[in-house]
Image: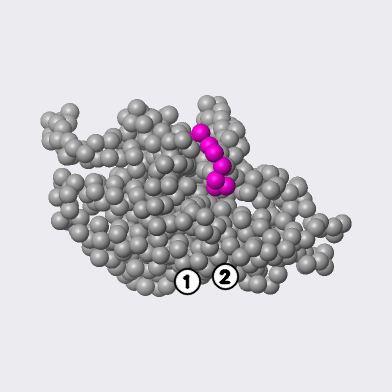
């Protein structure tokens, strides 16, 4: 690795740390209804939206009411997007005349974007109209991200309140997330990306003459606006098939760096927001520390694996599947960031990563993408492990486990176990079924352990709402469109609903004053315990599958065998 690449990685991490309290503090003021710099401009629009929707911002909801509002909102979004995709052939803003999307592909795509997964079993530039991209996919990029942020805020209220029957108002939380956070940041980033050459137009595809004198059609479209929110909202769905490896979606080193930073910007800052909302910044920084340690450890392993030549490879093998204009370092940093977040965008093909590096990316996703994770989703996913860590620690010292003065009892533990098991079951059972079904096996681009990694990656990416894929894997079949679509829905709402139930349960409890036997959850000891719980739970759940996939492939690669 060159000195320049090393310095860029250091700069990336430094900017992420520096931005966390600034953006995190701003978001805390937004979600508590305090005045911020954008209030004079956006408060009239916020109030107008409440009037149009008939929403009373002063009325709060129980966790059940909050969950019902969330489900109805997402169900409506699902119906609208599905209709747009199926009927796009009869709708405007379709200069290339693309027909309606086939039913099961439309189901898969709709489930994907509503759940913040953005898994794509199609090539955007030869499948979707401009209207579908803008009114369908880009809108859901905002709304699915806002849903994740709203759930986190509700959970923080549950921890902060005492003897309360409500956890907030979903409509208010989602509206503020879009208006005050996602929309301003995405607008600013889109303008910067356009200045770097990211295409933004409603014109028809361009006809050009190549150097050989042949005619070639260049796909264009309103890409910059979608790229901005796909990164900031940890969505990841590409306007073009090759996603952020495409020169019109990611043309320069600056656009590449800004998009990488955007992947983790809001998820990292939400740890500070969480600390503010629960009344203890140390709690937020402790969780941030766990995420950062896991991120740096995974990145180090991936960099070593990519730069260390194996006997079966040549000196140039590490560049396979990567953009030479971006290089190995940028490709590895992006792969680590996108699988740590529930983003899924790529600037290189993950199938071409070394088995060890690809295994780290796969393991990041399997953990539930709690290493910063998706906007909101990563942090409430990490809080699942916090509850487990507190519970295990309490058992070890013979005390009733407590977190932020709230007793963690059997009811909460059962709920978080459900949230852990549902996505895990989708990954393992889905991959097992695909491994014995001939039509599913036919989608692999490779045999042996690499082929198993392709299947595992697909089900992990869908069930944990990531959206990235090993290149070459054909997911556009009825089997994968249906099964992966269901996995996306279960992986999203099968975690959200238990965590909202936890929020309601904790909100109703009284806060217990700390005592001499209370385990501090904001110090180095708890950080170490939480790190161990995250790694051990992930390892126990997925190690057998990983051993048959990337681990076996790396060992065979070291012995001179490739697949």
Q: Residue 297, percent across and down?
A: 62, 45
Q: Crowding at label 2, few (<14), some or many (≥20) Cα neighbours within 10 Å?
A: some
Label 2: which secondary element:
helix
Seen in the image, is 88 located left or right of residue 33? Answer: left
The residue at 40%/43% (across/down) is 45
Label 1: which secondary element:
helix
* 453 over 252 or under it: above or below: below
Q: Which mark is residue 429?
A: 1
Q: Nearer the viewer, mark 2 or mark 1?
A: 2
Q: Which residues are magenta?
A: 31-38
Seen in the image, is 82 located left or right of residue 148? Answer: left
- Which quadrant of the figure contains the C terminus? bottom left
Residue for badge 2: 418
Seen in the image, is 21 located left or right of residue 309? Answer: right
* 467 over 206 or under it: above or below: below
Residue 71: image quadrant is bottom left
């Amino acid at each position: 690795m060159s000195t320049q690449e090393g310095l860029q990685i250091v700069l990336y991490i430094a900017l992420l740390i520096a931005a966390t309290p600034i953006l995190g503090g701003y978001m805390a003021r937004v979600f508590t209804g305090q005045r911020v710099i954008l209030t004079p401009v956006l408060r009239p629009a916020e109030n107008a939206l409440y009037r149009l929707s008939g929403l009373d911002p002063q009325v709060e909801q129980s966790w059940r009411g909050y969950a019902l509002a969330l489900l109805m909102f997402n169900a409506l979004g699902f119906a609208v997007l599905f209709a747009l995709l199926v009927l796009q052939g009869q709708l405007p803003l379709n200069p290339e005349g693309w027909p309606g999307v086939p039913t099961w592909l439309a189901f898969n795509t709709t489930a994907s974007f509503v759940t913040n997964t953005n898994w794509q079993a199609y090539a955007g530039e030869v499948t979707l109209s401009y209207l579908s991209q803008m009114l369908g996919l880009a809108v859901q990029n905002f709304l699915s991200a806002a849903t994740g942020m709203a759930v986190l805020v509700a959970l923080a209220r549950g921890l902060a309140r005492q003897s309360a029957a409500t956890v907030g108002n979903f409509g208010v939380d989602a509206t503020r997330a879009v208006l005050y956070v996602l929309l301003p940041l995405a607008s600013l980033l889109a303008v910067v990306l356009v200045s770097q050459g990211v295409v933004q137009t409603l014109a028809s595809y361009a006809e050009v003459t190549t150097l050989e004198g042949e005619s070639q059609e260049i796909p264009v479209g309103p890409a910059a606006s979608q790229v901005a929110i796909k990164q900031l909202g940890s969505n990841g769905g590409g306007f073009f098939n090759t996603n952020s490896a495409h020169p019109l979606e990611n043309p320069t080193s600056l656009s590449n760096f800004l998009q990488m930073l955007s992947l983790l910007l809001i998820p990292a800052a939400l740890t500070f927001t969480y600390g503010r909302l629960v009344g203890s910044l140390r709690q937020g920084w402790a969780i941030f520390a766990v995420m950062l340690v896991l991120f740096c450890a995974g990145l180090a392993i991936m960099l070593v694996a990519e730069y260390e030549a194996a006997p079966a490879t040549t000196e140039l093998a590490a560049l396979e599947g990567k953009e030479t204009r971006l290089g190995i370092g940028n490709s590895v940093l992006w792969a680590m960031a996108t699988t740590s977040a529930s983003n899924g965008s790529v600037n290189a093909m993950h199938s071409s990563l070394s088995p060890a590096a690809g295994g780290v990316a796969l393991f990041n996703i399997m953990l539930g993408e709690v290493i910063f994770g998706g906007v909101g989703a990563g942090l409430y996913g990490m809080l699942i492990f916090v509850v487990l860590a507190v519970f295990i620690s309490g058992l070890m010292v013979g005390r009733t486990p407590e977190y932020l003065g709230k007793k963690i009892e059997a009811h909460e533990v059962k709920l978080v176990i459900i949230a852990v098991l549902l996505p895990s079951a989708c990954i393992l059972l889905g991959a097992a079924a695909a491994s014995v079904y001939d039509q599913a096996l036919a989608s692999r681009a490779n045999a042996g352990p690499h082929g198993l990694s392709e299947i595992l990656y697909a089900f992990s990416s869908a069930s944990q709402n990531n959206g990235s894929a090993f290149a070459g894997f054909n997911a556009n079949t009825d089997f994968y469109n249906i099964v992966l679509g269901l996995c996306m829905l279960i992986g999203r709402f099968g975690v959200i609903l238990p965590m909202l139930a936890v929020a309601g349960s904790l909100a109703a409890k009284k806060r217990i004053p700390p005592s001499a036997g209370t385990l501090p959850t904001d110090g180095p000891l708890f950080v170490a315990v939480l790190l161990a719980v995250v790694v051990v739970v992930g390892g126990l759940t997925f190690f057998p599958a990983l051993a048959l996939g990337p681990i076996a492939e790396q060992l065979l690669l070291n012995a001179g065998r490739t697949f």
